[in-house]
Amino acid sequence: GQQVMQIPQYQHVQEGEDFTTYCNSSTTLSNIQWYKQRPGGHPVFLIQLVKSGEVKKQKRLTFQFGEAKKNSSLHITATQTTDVGTYFCAGKTSGFQKLVFGTGTRLLVSP
Amino acid sequence: DGGITQSPKYLFRKEGQNVTLSCEQNLNHDAMYWYRQDPGQGLRLIYYSQIVNDFQKGDIAEGYSVSREKKESFPLTVTSAQKNPTAFYLCASSLRQTTYEQYFGPGTRLTVT
């Protein structure tokens, strides 16, 4: 079945450092979504990418969808302690009804 | 206030008992979902529903049951057949099932001893 993996599983950075998480699908995706889950909280939608090679920015966050639509990345510039949480990608294939969540990357930011 | 509510936040049950987790949304969303999250793990889909009176099994449906009698409500029953029921359960909804973002409830943490 469709699988979505994320790397790294965990990253600990100093405040101000950059952070990137990568998402890789075993199959071509029709779209990819990114969610953030704060410790003890629930996932919150961040963004959706649909087009091949698409890049979207939200302040310090940059999201990219690969040309082959099988991978995606989230890059945070100059992390802040408020960025702490687990970031999940979630992808859907065109012929498949379900959104498949990635394994998540847990980010810890030290002040 | 529009959103998804799940109750209770924490639930404790003895092994062998069925337990029903509630999920209500007032977003007028057609699609609803149940996920299970284990510590340090991703989200695994249990059941989903695209419309009232219709639902499909997700990846880990064994030991669970659902109903969708009303658009607003999608309760999940964790039966005694579920071998490892202790987990964090998240309910979500989306406008439709296709490419729309999912809105999550606050979750219910179920502990079975």
Image (cartoon, rainbow, N blue to C red):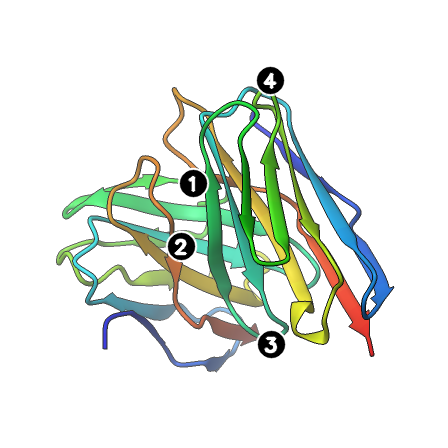
What residue sits 61% from the left and 24% below the top?
Answer: A70
Q: Nearer the viewer, mark 1 or mark 4?
A: 4
Residue ID for mark 2:
B34
Separation of marks 1 and 2 at Cα, in angstroms = 9 Å
Residue ID for mark 3:
B113
Q: Which chain is home to disc 2?
A: B
Q: Specify whether residue B82 is in view.
A: no
Residue ID for mark 4:
A68
State yes or no: discs 1 and 2 in contact (Cβ < 8 Å). Answer: yes
Could you tell me which secondary element the residue under label 3 belongs to?
Answer: loop
Residue A110 lies in quadrant:
bottom right
What residue sits 73% from the left and 59% below the top?
Answer: A106
Q: Whole-percent x and y of residue A67?
A: 60, 20
Q: Which chain is home to disc 4?
A: A
Q: Of the two numbered discs 1 and 3 on the same chain, state the one appearing first in sequence.
A: 1
Quadrant into which the N terminus of chain A falls: top right
Q: Which chain is home to disc 3?
A: B
Q: Whole-percent x and y of residue B97?
A: 30, 40
Could you tell me which secondary element the residue under label 2 belongs to?
Answer: strand
Q: Specify whether residue A7 is in view.
A: yes
Residue ID for mark 1:
B58
Q: Which of B6 and B12 is in front in this view?
A: B6
Could you tell me which secondary element the residue under label 4 belongs to?
Answer: loop
* Residue type of the residue flagged with mark 2: Trp
Q: Do marks 1 and 2 share a chain?
A: yes
Q: Which of marks 1 and 3 is in front?
A: 1
Q: Nearer the viewer, residue A90 or B10?
A: A90
Q: Residues within 10 Å of mark 2 (few under 14, many from 20)?
A: many
Q: Whole-percent x and y of residue B13?
A: 49, 78
Q: Do marks 4 and 3 share a chain?
A: no
* Residue type of the residue flagged with mark 1: Gly
